[in-house]
Image (tube, rainbow, N blue to C red):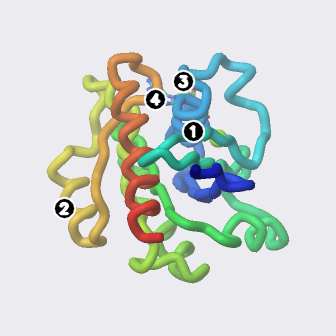
């Protein structure tokens, strides 16, 4: 018969972007299945995990959040960027400055050997705040194309968009699984 592997595989995915764009809410939403309440959002954890199954294989998806310290101390940086399988860049669709910060985040990743060779995806969060939109889909898509990244627009808050949050991380996991 077939035996399960002794240890499930781990995919380490870092979630990067300006403070306040919703990185913690997105990782929480995927791992816990709901939008965090106030206290949960502020808990300073390094990463959250969720075990998923692809083609019958259990895979531990480890989402690394920056725990409120978007600018790390030097010692933390190495820890964070070690053994990364994929990168999720997040901006806030209601905050143009968070979109303009993306090239700097992409460059920081590139300096840690996380360029085009690793799966990278772009996420525009807070799409539930339609009235406050500052970054159009068209502009974001152009940027995503120029960096060879897929674009997802989502909301960590709106329950109707739950599937989209799920889709983001499942897409990355499928891509990683197919590589190995
Ligand atoms: P982080 O600093 O990138 O980790 O951002 P947080 O996840 O802590 O979220 C920052 C703020 O944005 C919090 O007040 C969240 O409640 C809010 N927020 C996060 N995601 C969404 C979203 O999809 N829609 C709305 N309306 N607010 C959000
Ligand atoms: Mg956070």
Specify which label sits upstream in the sequence, 2 or 3.
3
Which residue is identified by label 3?
33
**Residue found at x 28% / y 34%:** 133
* Furthest-right residue in this view: 75
Question: Mark 1 touching mark 3, by CB under 8 A?
Answer: no
Which residue is identified by label 1?
27
Real-space Cα separation, disc 4 to disc 3, in angstroms: 10 Å
Specify which label sits upstream in the sequence, 2 or 1.
1
Locate residue 136: give its quadrant: top left
Which residue is identified by label 4?
156
Name the quarter showing ligand 2: top right
Can you say whether 60 is above or below 113 in the image?
Answer: above
Q: Can you see residue 27?
A: yes
Q: Is mark 2 within 8 Å of ligand 1?
A: no
**Residue found at x 75% / y 73%:** 78
Task: State the residue in front, 88 or 163.
Answer: 163
Can you say whether 158 is above or below 98 in the image?
Answer: above
Characterize the local packing of mark 3: few (<14), some (14-19) or many (20 or more) Cα atoms within 10 angstroms. some
Q: Can you see residue 62?
A: no
Real-space Cα separation, disc 4 to disc 1, in angstroms: 9 Å
């Amino acid at each position: 018969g077939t035996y399960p592997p002794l240890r499930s595989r781990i995919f380490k995915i870092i979630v990067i972007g300006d403070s306040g764009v919703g990185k913690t809410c997105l990782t929480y939403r995927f791992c816990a299945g709901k939008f965090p309440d106030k206290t949960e959002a502020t808990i300073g954890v390094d990463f959250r995990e969720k075990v998923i199954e692809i083609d019958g294989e259990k895979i531990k998806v480890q989402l690394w959040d920056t725990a409120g310290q978007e600018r790390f101390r030097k010692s933390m940086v190495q820890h964070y960027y070690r053994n990364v399988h994929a990168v999720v860049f997040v901006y806030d669709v209601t905050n143009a400055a968070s979109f303009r910060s993306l090239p700097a985040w992409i460059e920081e990743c590139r300096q840690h050997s996380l360029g085009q060779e690793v799966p990278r995806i772009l996420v525009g969060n807070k799409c539930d705040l339609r009235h406050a939109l500052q970054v159009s889909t068209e502009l974001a898509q152009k940027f995503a194309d120029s960096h060879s990244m897929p674009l997802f627009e989502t909301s960590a808050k709106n329950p109707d968009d739950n599937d989209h949050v799920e889709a983001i991380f499942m897409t990355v996991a499928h891509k990683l699984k197919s590589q190995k």
